Every structure is written in C-alpha cells, then in structure tokens.
Amino acid sequence: MIIELYAINTSKSMLFLLKMTCFEPDLKGEVTYLKDFEIGKSIIGISAISGNAMALIARDRANTDYIYFLECQTPPHDWYVSISWKTDEKLLSVHLSDDGLLLYTLSESRLSSYVPDPFDGILQRRWTIDLAHGEKHCTAIPNTGAMIALGSSNGTVTVYLSGGTRAWSTDLSSIITALAFSNSGDLLAVGCSTGDLHIYTGHGDPVLTRKFDKSIYSLAFSPGCTNIVVGFEDGTTQIFGSDLGAPLKTSTFVCPARHVSFSRSGETILICLDRKLVLIDHCNVVWAGLPTRDRESALTLLGAALSADSSYCIATIKRGNTADCLRFYSIKLPQMLIREAEAEACIKEGTTLFQRKKYVEAFDCFVRAEKLSEPSLFTAFCKGESLFHLDELKRANEFYRECLGFNNTNARSIDACIMRGITALRLNNEDLAYAAFSDAERLSPNDSTARYLLTLVQYRKSKGEMSCPAPIDDYSVDGIPVNLASFIPSVVPNKYKKCFIMPCYSDEAGEIPEKKMFTTQVSKSIDTGYNVGKGDAGLIYNVDSDSLVGVFEAHSFPRIGPLMPSFTSARVGKSRKNVLSIAVVPVGSLQSIPNARSIITSLGREVLVSRTSGAFMAKPVFEGEDAAHILYHFGLAPKPVPYPQVGTIVKITGESFKGAEAIVTSIDRERGKITVELCDVVVAVPIELDRDMVELPDADEPTHRS
C-alpha cells in the first residue's frame, strides 16, 4: 500500500511531493543471490565475519585439511584468499577475533591459536593444547578473542586465555553440546544434552541455570546480553530475555538450528538450518528460504555468517558431487525496504525538479535520499550537477570527487561509466574520462554518446590540434539531462559574434530550412532592429514548442521589399510590401533547445504576438555576451563567465603576471577588456587584460579591498 502526501512549502511558494510509503504489517524482507566463491575443496566450517576478514577450514580429496584466511576490500564483493595454510590435523571448527589478529582452530586432537600474517601469507602458531582422545568437543570465543571456551563430551568446560593459560574450569557431569560467549566475554552460556542451560561470568562464577526438557543444540547472545537464543534438538528455537523467563518468541523448524548469530544491532538473528536460512527481525520471522541459481538442485547448508550491518550473509553450500562453495546473499530487512522506497521517492522528485531547473530544491531532495539510503554514484552525481548549474563550482567539485570514489566493479553499466567520465571531465581529468568512456563503448559498441564523448576527450587532450566534434543533444542519466555542449573547452573560437532570432509557429518552422530564408512582416519601428550581416548566426524560435532551433548562417544582408512569388508563409501570406527577408543556410544538423523563452527573457528580451504580424521580437539581434549566452547552448560559444565587479580582487592567469592578485578598476564589456591594478605594489599601474586572463577568487576568500 502506497500513500502519497502533498504539502505546500509556503516560505518558497513551491509544491513539494512528500512520498511516504506505508507497508502492510506482514511485510517480508528480501534475500537475493549475489555470487559464489569457489574453494575447490569440501568446506568443514567458517568463522564469523570480522570486519573485512573471515576464516574457513576445508579438506581436499586426499583428506588433507587447510586453513584459509580471506580478506575483502569492498564487502560483500572482492573477497580473496590471502593465506592458504596446510595442516596435518583433522579440523572441526575455526574462530576469528573481531580485529582479525587471532585465529583459533579445533581439531580431533588439538586446540590451537594462530596469528595471521597476510603480508607474508603465513599463520604463526602461538600455542597448542592436546585433547583427550575419543572425546567430542565444542568451542566458542567472544568478539575480542581474549579467551576461548572448550566444552567436552565428558561434561568439562574449560576457559583458556589468549596466551594459552587456563583461566578456569568446571565439571557439569553432562555432555556439553553448545557454547556461546557474549560479545565482550563477560558471560558464557553452556548448553547440555540433558537440557540444562548454565550461564557463568567470564571469570567462572555461576549466574543463572535453567532446565529444559530437550537437548540444547545451539546458543547465541545478543549484543548487550539483553536476549539469548536457544536452539533445541527437536527443531524448536526460542528467544529469551536476560532472566531466562517466558520465551519472547518460539519458532519450530523441521530440523535443529546448525548455527545462530546476531547482528551488531542485536535486532536481527540469522538461523542456519539444513536447507534453509531464516531471518528474525524484532522477534518476527521476516524471511525464510535459500535462493538458488538457475537449474540448481536442492542444496545443503553447512553453516552461515552474518555481516555486522546485516546487509549480507555468507553461507557454506554443499552441492552434491561438486566442490563446496561460499555463497553470498544480500539482505534487505523490512525497515530497509521502507527507507529505500522513501529514498526512491526523493530521487524521483529531485529528478523532476532538476528537469524544471529548480536546482536548489533538487539538491535538497538528493541529500534527503542519501540520508534515507546509502550514498550512491547517482545521488553524488546529481548533487554535483545541481550545484554546477547553480555556478557553485567549488562545492560541485567536492561531489564530483566523491563520484570517483565509488567502486562499481560489481555492476558496471553504461550509465555508470558515462557518469564517471562526465565527472572526470568536470574535474578536467581527461585521462580518467577517456578510460571511463572507453569502458562505456566496450559495454555498448553502438552507443553514439560514448563515441561522441571519446572524440571530445581526444580533442581536449590534443589541445585543439584536431577538429572539435559538433555538439549533440543532451544525454539523460535516469532523467537527469546533461548538456554535453558544456564540455567543449573555452579555447573553442567563437565564430559568431552576433546572432538573431526569427519567431515563428510550428507550421512555418519546416519551411525555413526548405526555402533557406527567414521572412517576417515588419514595420518601420522595428526595421532597424535587424542590423545583421553575412556570416551572422540565425535561430528559429518555435512559439508553439517553446524551443530554439538552429543554427543557420546568414548569406545575405536583411532585405525589405516584395517577397518572391514562389515563397509562401502563413505569417506573411501574399504580402508584397514590408516583408523582411534574410537568406540563410543551415550549419550542420539542426538542434532543438527546449525552454527557450526562459533563455530569451533572462537576457531582458521578450517575444510579442501581433494580430496582423504574428509573433515577433522588438530586438531580435543579440551581440557580445548576450550572443554568447544563447550560442553556448548550441556548443558554439564557451560558457558565459560573469564579469567581476569594479573593486573585486581577481587573480591574473596570463603569462606576464600569472598568479598575481589585482583589483579591478574598470570594465569594457564591448571590447571584452578589464583594467586592473596590481595589489601589494608601491606604484599602482593600470593594466588592460582580456576577460579570460583573470579569474574570480574562491567564494570563501575576501573579494574587495578598501
């Protein structure tokens, strides 16, 4: 059930969509298969996941046992074996401390302690304790690894410190079937075949005892020792409070729980059965099953380990006659699904606001999305693009650098490659951009955008020695339009110093390229407005679609007089007087830029409508900065750079005074010149520079001097 609530933000007079997703009470979690990690041997047991490390023990066909130490760079992906250690013992279980510095193994005849050394690829044995022959044992360690408990089938429980010395021991005269330490090692739970459950302090003092009518098979403490899970031999699993009173939750399965573990938060429990994994969240079973690959027969579970944040688990899978493997599953609990749905709603609203050019509101939506869910390449990219359009380049670059920090090796897509490449271009890193766009082209060899961007990067790297590719339409990344023309370097010469706009309607827009002529009825009051000449750029303003279409190049001066009989136009009809015409030729393939009225009005111009003449502009010609502002959208001019104000401190980028600070004393916009005086000199000498030879200081630096 999804409920959408709308609210008005009166302070900004904007309509925001606040999408809150409400789920049914019996909402289940999601567990999906990620990948297999092949060992090539039969896996005997695995340790808990300790940060980015874990250990397992395996046996080959020659009946030789091995200890594997695994590490990971970006969980749950990229696991690799850093230590493979051969041993002559018949191993039964393995434990790894939370810091990954201590490793314990239990075999048929020994209890051993090791120190992993991944740098040299070895295990340094610290100590070994021989065990009585013929007895069965079970072990447990706290997260710290500061001690290890050993339970024997003769009823003895012994606790050894990490150095190998015995801390304490007790005899319960019953077969020990399960042991569990609390995370800190302050408590130890001991389960017996007779159904007795004993809880001791870490120093061996009895705390609590309870008698059950069935044998205990598995045990686990929650963080903080607020709860304890007890798995029984008949398949019943119960959750108790710290006082072992009435059970908080009882679940019955067809087989006993092989392994039980808590997440670090203590709210999630992973139960491993013979052929099923069970997730319990807040004492409710939210998922049960075992996702398999296509055409895969029934599997047998040998064990499982839950990550600290409950985002994934690793299961030991037995696959019939083939070798065992580690199988990785991603986990999404109900509350995570709710947050993801809310984050998705924020991203959807942010995308809509971005398309409407409401970049401030869009940025806020993407920030909220990251608070609800994990940051991603897409949200970081969207934040950077929003700030880029707000001309907050310094803040935008922070998010662009964040984009490059995301590792997408697990799911490489063409959009991910292009986003990384665009990010690299924003940061002027052509080498990284070229690598990203090359990856995109390999993923989709026929993608025109990837090929275009590769050509553009080659042009930028060649410093203009090769021809610049003509701009193409915007590229949309999940609804976020990216203006590819903005990546054309500012060194591109601005061929057109002047441009003019011819308003028309949709039925006339097609005639202009065909007839190669702009025409309009004019009056004496606006005749002088068309002060254009050969070689100036011309654009069509389609009133119906609110778009600029172009570019055309004028091949004649404006001419006022009778219109040639072969040319007809809905606007001029059969008029023979007061018709202005300009011969034009399209420059390459025509482009269409949406939201044209906002571009025109931002320059202080307006499109008018006359009952007799149709749409027209009183001042249709744009020069200097205004022309560059419009032609920039077509990739024919560099991005307009605002002029500094008089009195602003700027930094000179020209070769003569490169790096020096100067104060602006006057500005000549028509000539594109700025006059400055050097700071920190005895005699201030006026220096005239081109506008592009100075840059504005950072926003957090002072901009004026008295």
Image (cartoon, rainbow, N blue to C red):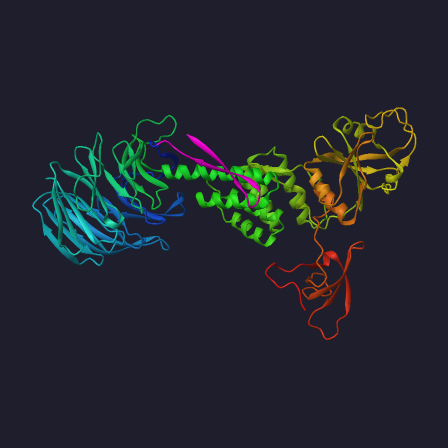
Q: Residue at x 72, y 51 (%)?
A: 491
The mark total stands at 0
In which quadrant will I find the C terminus? bottom right
Classify residue 339 as left or right of residue 348.
left
- Residue 23 seen: yes
Classify residue 16 as left or right of residue 68.
right
Classify residue 380 as left or right of residue 467.
left
Q: Which stretch appears magenta?
A: 1-24
Q: Residue furthest left?
A: 173
Residue 102 place in picture, x, y as percent:
28, 54
Secondary structure mostly seen in the magenta stretch: strand
Residue 5 covered by magenta stretch: yes
Q: Quadrant of residue 14?
A: top right
Residue 278 covered by magenta stretch: no
Between 403 and 434, which is closer to the camera in this rendering?
403
Between 570 and 78, which is closer to the camera in this rendering?
570
From this view, report whether residue 394 is shown above or below residue 567.
below
Between 19 and 678, which is closer to the camera in this rendering?
19
- Residue 467 seen: no
Q: Quadrant of residue 453?
A: top right
Residue 111 place in picture, x, y as percent:
19, 50
Between 46 and 603, which is closer to the camera in this rendering?
603
Q: Residue at x 75, y 40 (%)?
A: 606
Residue 132 place in picture, x, y as percent:
12, 48
Q: Residue furthest bottom?
A: 682
In which quadrant will I find the N terminus? top left
Residue 438 place in picture, x, y as percent:
58, 41
